[in-house]
Image: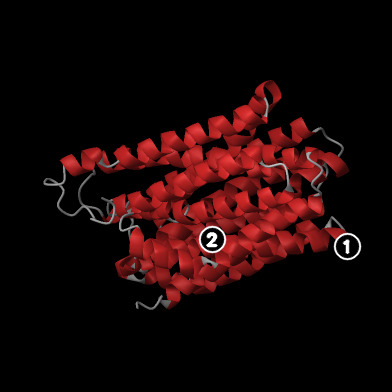
Amino acid sequence: MLKMPRALWLLIVGMAINVTGASFLWPLNTIYIHDILGKSLSVAGLVLMVNAGASVIGNLIGGFLFDKIGGYRSILLGISITIVALIGLTLNHSWNFYIVYLTIIGFGSGIVFPSMYAMAGSVWKEGGRRSFNAMYVAQNLGVAIGAALGGLVADIRFDYIFLANTLTYAIFFVIALFGYKSIQANPSNQTSVLDQSKKIKDHTKLYALLIVCIGYLLCWMGYVQWQTTIASHTQSLGISLKQYSILWTINGALIVLAQPIISLIVKKYTKTLKTQIIVGLIIFIVSFAVVGVAQQYTAFVVAMVIITIGEMFVWPAVPTVANELAPKGREGFYQGIVNSTATGGRMLGPLMGGILVDFHGMGMLFGVLMGLMVIAIFTTLVYDRKLKANQAKVPEMSKSVL
């Protein structure tokens, strides 16, 4: 059994604290904009779309910066931008300032994620998918802790949410400043494009990643419905907000507690990343089928458990595919594509879901979602077809991807 290196543990802790800070704010954004600032839900959705769009740009720039200047400086830059915006938001969270600062926060935090994942892949290459699985668990732990603490802080005084978010990011900055420099200083982990002697001319691996990310985008467009259209659907059925919140508690707890079981299943039965993703997508389809006919709360609990199992197969696997496909010096860029794809799905999903429900009802939505998962299965099946055809020309291609 390979032991995780200290550098990866530092990244895991940093990721958990980073997402804890972000999770103080994101679950309460719509409530603050609508209930406290007095804006409509449509306006709130537009602001959150701008925030997500800024995060997409940050993801792509963050991946590019990782390859150019390294993960250490890229992460510090992203955290610094986010902290400056959070300090501004703490001091002045009136409407106009809220829009500006929330957009900057999306951009700054977007820079951080690709470098975190790229560094995780570089510090424990022999660990394979386990590095990304550990980061995924840390991310979800942060979501569970941050969302829970955010609700407690908001009950005391809503304004304290912004201060708590700022202080958490300050802790993350200290960890990154003193903990990540040694990771970056290790020559074996340096993956800057500047170190490359030859320009990459074969883009087959990039095209393969883009095909994978088409399915990944569709997955997120479906998954985000749990936070938007399905959330509204539960309210129309008389399910309380407290009960709905418990669904996400189940989600976070299951991800952390069931990890050893899922890891054992993945290791024993899904020998390749492609198989792992396809199994997860099939589980997604089952979940949407269950929630599509759900009328009682227990059915929603069952559907949440099923989709959580599905995401435990899919979410860690896609960054691992990106890491396997990335040529030397392009790890950050490839992780930036993956992270921006997930953010794009979270941005487009609510719009798609809202239109479908408004014009055709919930039944049509779940039918479309299952159809999107079928398309995602197809893209997963074919993404490496050209890679296999060129395998003789590219002997260094990792077998774990194929």
Crowding at mark 2 (Cα within 10 Å: few <14, some 14-19, many 20+): many
Name which residue lies at 78% across and 34% down: 41
Measured as percent of width and height from the top left, residue 19 is found at: 61, 59
Helix, strand or loop under label 2: helix
Residue nearer the viewer, 360 or 134: 360
The image position of residue 370, as x and y in percent, is 51, 35
Q: Tell me the number on the disc at residue 165.
A: none
Residue neighbourhood size for the residue with mark 1, other residues' Cα within 10 Å, grouped as few (<14), some (14–19), many (≥20): few
Q: Which of the 4 quarters of the picture holds residue 148?
A: bottom right
Q: Nearer the viewer, residue 22 or 92?
A: 22
Q: State whether residue 157 is above or below residue 371.
A: below
**In the depicted structure, whether residue 70 falls above or below residue 212:** below
Residue furthest out toward the left: 392
Give the x, y percent position of residue 276: 38, 53
Which image quarter holds the N terminus? Answer: bottom left
Question: Which numbered disc flags the more N-terminal residue, 2 or 1?
Answer: 2
> Which kind of residue does numbered mark 2 sit on?
Leu
Q: Identify the residue position indicated by label 2 in the image.
A: 76
Picture quadrant of residue 157: bottom right
Nearest the eye: 364 or 347: 364
Q: Position of residue 261 (x, y in %)?
A: 47, 68
347 up-or-down from 297: above or below? above
Front: mark 2 or 1: 1
Mark 1 sits on what residue? 156
